[in-house]
Amino acid sequence: MAKIIITQVKSKIRSTKRQKRTLEALGIKKMNNPIEVEDNPQILGMITKVNHLLRVEKK
């Protein structure tokens, strides 16, 4: 499958608990630290929930 590079670009301080847990489930630990994940429906669903905090690039 294809890969996606996800980078958190906005702070999660004012986010809900659900959004914070979604970021943790994606494997994001710090801001501006890119993570490479598989492109599958589960990951894409999590990305849509917190897309206002992320920058997503196709690889």
Image: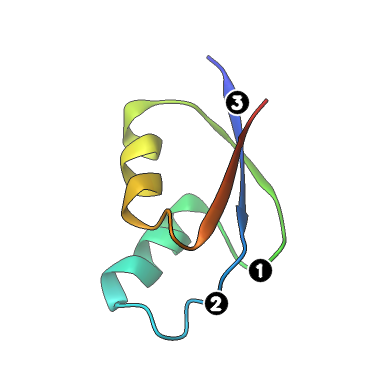
For the point 62% across and 64% down, the residue is 9
How far is mark 1 from mark 3, CA to CA? 20 Å
The span from disc 3 to disc 2 (Cα, nearest Å) is: 24 Å
Residue nearest the viewer, comparing 23 with 48 = 48
For disc 1, the marked residue is 31
Residue 49 versus residue 53 in the image, above or below: above
- Residue 57 appears in which quarter of the rendering? top right
Residue 16: percent from the left, percent from the top?
Answer: 30, 77
Residue at numbered disc 2? 11
Counting residues from the start of the chain, the first of labels 3 and 2 encountered is 3
Relative to 15, is 2 above or below?
above
C-alpha distance separating marks 1 and 2: 7 Å
Left or right, residue 9 beside residue 26: right
Q: Which residue is mark 3?
A: 3
Query: Which amino acid does the dot numbered 3 rest on?
Result: Lys
Q: Are marks 1 and 3 in contact (CB under 8 Å)?
A: no
Position above or below: 10 against 22: below
Q: Residue at x 39, y 71 (%)?
A: 20
- Binning the other alpha carbons within 10 Å of mark 2 as few (below 14), some (14 to 19) or many (20 upward) gives few
